[in-house]
């Protein structure tokens, strides 16, 4: 890995900033600049994303160490820390805010979409709550790997623009190298942002924020008869689809607090997140989730719970008649469940090769998941190999060997093949479609940890780069990277992941 040493800053303006959030009232944020670091080194720059954003990529490659560490404020930036509150593991905290992140500003990308540029780990802010405002290298690399993998999987997510080491340590349970992560998002507005103002009885600011969100994310709702209720329904629909897509790839967010749910519908805050190896609906990785609140199968219900908290902030705007407003909110929350179920079932049909709908499909899917759980079978490999079985019965042995009791799978395969006889797709086309729904590669936890360990202990970023490469094309068969598709061997399994703050 070749480091890019700090260079004299260019006077070129690499970011075409247009900072709409900074034009909101002063109680929405605190203006604060990043704290300079000792000796920044740019270890990864996402040039392709930079070009998509319309940035001056060459200038950023040259000056990136200074800019992405916070040592140089680029022209046009208006650094600020956003105010928000949130329910953390069910307990409301009235003031959280960006305690170690600073929004540099916003750009309009080449497709006309507004995107935030944020530095994470860039020093203390008024919301740091006695924290140092810094990030360790490990969590920065984790977020870079997983956010980019999620993007490659086709799941709405924040993105990674850069990772920079600071040249100075951070102090956690041990001394670790410090780093700064540069995150790109449609916005950083969260359910907790609305909660911040509602908790203070400041409905004027709730309305201002809602108007801003409509203008920025849901402009089609401007002329709605009930724009704020329409906004809530739109946010709920996006969350329902997002969480269904998490489940399709075995993703567990780990910390679905209301301050970690965006109103734009992007996945955000990759702390103790992970992808399942063996299928278990109760699977939890987060070291701080001691009671399984955010377990894999709980995520849809938690999404609904979080949306109920958003409804509480907006319901005074739904209708002037209180009972009517509450009934509207309850109807929308019920509809969320139906929308989620539809997206989840549609996606699971695609995963097992079904293009049409029949009443028994849900039972067929649930039967397979039960067999996977009882057989301790790898979630990703089962569905990937099922695509091969759809094309060739001779591929069945490679599938059934994933189960601890292979004989239990044969009856299900018979039911599945009988169901396929009522499909119209030709066999090879069906298998190809299944491969577009079932990744060959995910950022498996043991691989992520290996990459982090090598970088943290030895400043060796080769495993980090290799994992980024493999997960950038998750749906392709790449025999040269077959080892990355394999589940962990004995002694490699990661049982816990950590927040990193």
Image (cartoon, rainbow, N blue to C red):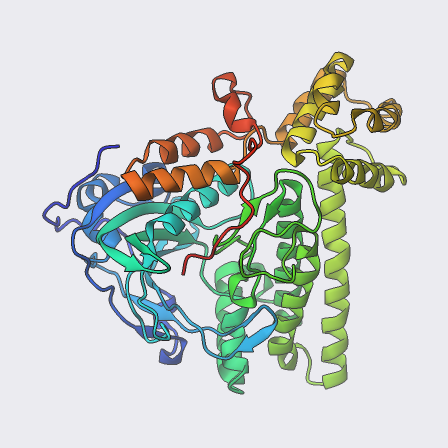
Q: Nearer the viewer, residue 414 or 54?
A: 414
**Residue at left 70%, top 60%?**
301
Q: Quadrant of the N terminus?
A: top left
Query: Splitting the image into 4 quarters, where does residue 406 fall?
Result: top right
Q: Is residue 256 left or right of residue 247?
A: left
- Pick out the residue farthest to the bottom: 201
Q: Is residue 199 above or below residue 368?
A: below
Q: Residue 320, can we see it?
A: yes
Which residue is at a point 26% across and 61% down the rendered structure image? 77
Residue 93 vs residue 353: left or right?
left
Please provide percent x and percent y for residue 326.
Answer: 73, 78
- Say which quarter of the image contains residue 468: top left
Quadrant in which the C terminus is drawn = bottom left
**Please, which residue is most extreme toward the front here?**
491
Residue at image position (46%, 45%) is 147
Q: Position of residue 260 (x, y in %)?
A: 52, 62
Image position, residue 264 (x, y; %): 53, 58
Of residue 285 and residue 322, the one placed in the foreground of this image is 285
Judge whether 444 appears above or below 335 on screen.
above
Q: Position of residue 35 (x, y in %)?
A: 22, 64
Quick check: 402 above or below 244? above
Quick check: 246 left or right of 58? Answer: right
Instruction: State left or right for residue 327 relative to residue 293.
Output: right
Q: Nearer the viewer, residue 156 or 282?
A: 282
Give residue 421's quadrant in the image. Answer: top right
Who's the residue at 50% across and 49% down the image? 157
């Amino acid at each position: 890995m070749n480091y890019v040493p700090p260079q004299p800053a260019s006077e070129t303006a690499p970011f075409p900033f247009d900072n709409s959030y900074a034009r909101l009232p002063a109680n929405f944020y605190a203006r604060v600049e990043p704290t300079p670091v000792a000796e920044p080194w740019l270890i990864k720059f996402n040039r392709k994303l930079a070009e998509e954003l319309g940035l001056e990529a060459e200038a950023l490659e040259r000056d990136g160490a200074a800019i992405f560490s916070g040592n140089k404020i680029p022209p046009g930036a208006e650094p600020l820390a956003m105010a928000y509150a949130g329910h953390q593991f069910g307990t409301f905290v009235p003031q959280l805010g960006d305690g170690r992140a600073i929004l540099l500003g916003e750009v309009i990308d080449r497709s006309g979409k507004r995107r935030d540029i944020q530095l994470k780990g860039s020093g203390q802010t008024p919301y740091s709550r006695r924290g140092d405002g810094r990030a360790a290298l490990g969590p920065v690399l984790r977020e870079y790997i997983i956010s980019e993998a999620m993007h490659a999987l086709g799941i709405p997510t924040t993105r990674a623009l850069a990772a920079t080491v600071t040249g100075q340590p951070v102090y956690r349970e041990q001394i670790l190298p410090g780093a700064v992560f540069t995150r790109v998002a449609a916005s950083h507005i969260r359910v907790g942002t609305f909660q911040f103002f509602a908790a203070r009885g400041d409905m004027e600011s709730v309305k201002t924020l809602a108007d801003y969100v409509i203008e920025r994310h849901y402009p089609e709702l401007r002329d709605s008869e009930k724009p704020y209720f329409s906004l809530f329904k739109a946010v709920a629909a996006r969350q329902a689809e997002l969480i269904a897509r998490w489940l399709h790839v075995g993703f567990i967010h780990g910390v679905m607090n209301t301050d970690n749910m965006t109103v734009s519908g992007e996945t955000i805050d990759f702390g103790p997140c992970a992808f399942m190896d063996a299928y278990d609906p109760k699977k939890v990785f987060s070291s701080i989730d001691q009671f399984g609140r955010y377990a894999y199968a709980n995520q849809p219900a938690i999404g609904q719970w979080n949306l109920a908290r958003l409804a509480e902030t907006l319901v005074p705007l739904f209708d002037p008649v209180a009972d009517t407003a509450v009934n509207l909110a309850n109807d929308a929350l019920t509809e969320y469940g139906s929308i989620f179920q539809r997206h989840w079932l549609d996606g699971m049909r695609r995963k097992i090769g079904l293009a049409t709908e029949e009443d028994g499909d849900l039972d067929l899917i649930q039967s397979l998941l039960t067999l996977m759980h009882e057989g301790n079978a790898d979630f990703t490999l089962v569905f990937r190999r099922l695509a091969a079985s759809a094309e060739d019965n001779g591929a069945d042995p490679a599938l059934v060997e994933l189960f601890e009791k292979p004989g239990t799978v044969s009856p299900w395969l018979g039911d599945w093949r009988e169901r396929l006889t009522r499909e119209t797709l030709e066999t090879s086309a069906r298998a190809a479609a299944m491969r577009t729904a079932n990744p060959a590669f995910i950022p498996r936890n043991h691989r992520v940890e290996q990459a982090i360990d090598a970088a943290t202990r030895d400043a060796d970023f080769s495993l980090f780069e290799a994992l980024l490469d493999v997960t950038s094309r998750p749906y392709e068969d790449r025999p040269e990277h077959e080892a990355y598709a394999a589940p962990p061997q004995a002694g490699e399994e990661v049982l816990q992941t950590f927040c990193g703050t």
